[in-house]
Amino acid sequence: MVKIYTDGSCIGNPGKGGWAAIIIDNNKKKIISGSEKHTTNNRMELIAVIKALKHVNKSQIIIITDSKYVKNGIEVWINKWKNNGWMTAEKKPVKNKDLWLTLDKLEKKKKIKWEWVKGHSSNIYNNKADEIARNEANSILFDEKI
């Protein structure tokens, strides 16, 4: 079983952001990460999971995230959103629908167990993913709009 630790970061929200995933398969660790110049924290959290799932070929996966938005979104809210025409309970369009559609499609191809871990606590891999995501966000030097 593959374990994936994911995190997203954003400096300003919206602002410059980064994401990271630590993939552990048979005690082999691989880190993938990236950044975007103008994004939100929730988008970075979702992108971290999506990129990791696209990277892993195995079907049995545990995803460990400190994002209740991601975990609750894919396990609970998404079915309600679909039934409501991608509207929230408050009758507003679901944010990040493009990413939710992608994650939903990827999740159907795999057997995923979702685990939530408290952010900035004692989980070494969650803390490392957080550090990498923040470093990715900080690597964006400036907004090119002048």
Image: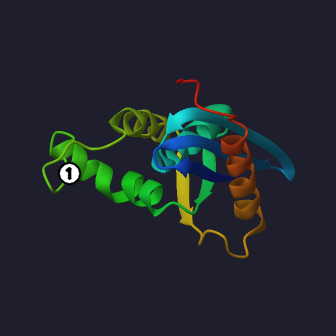
Left or right for 125, reference 87: right
Asked whether 110 or 48 is in front, the reply is: 48
Left or right for 90, reference 118: left
* Vertical placement of residue 43 versus 127, above or below: above
Q: Residue furthest right?
A: 28
Left or right for 113, reference 136: left
Q: Residue furthest bottom?
A: 122
Question: Circle 1 — which element?
Answer: loop
Q: Residues within 10 Å of mark 1 (few under 14, many from 20)?
A: some
Q: Is residue 28 visible?
A: yes
- For the point 23% across and 47% down, the residue is 81
Q: Residue furthest front?
A: 146
* Vertical placement of residue 120 versus 25, above or below: below
Q: Position of residue 123 (x, y in %)?
A: 72, 70
Quadrant of res 5? bottom right
Asked whether 121 or 86 is in front, the reply is: 121
- For the point 58% across and 33% down, the residue is 36
Asked whether 123 or 63 is in front, the reply is: 123
Task: Name the residue carrying label 1.
Answer: 88
Count up the numbered dots.
1
User: Which part of the image, by quadrant, shows the C terminus?
Assistant: top right
- For the point 68% across and 48% down, the residue is 133
Q: Amino acid at mark 1?
A: Thr
Left or right for 25, reference 13: right
- For the point 67% across and 33% down, the residue is 55
Q: Is residue 57 visible?
A: no
Q: Position of residue 115 (x, y in %)?
A: 56, 64
Q: Position of residue 125 (x, y in %)?
A: 75, 61
Asked whether 93 or 2 is in front, the reply is: 93
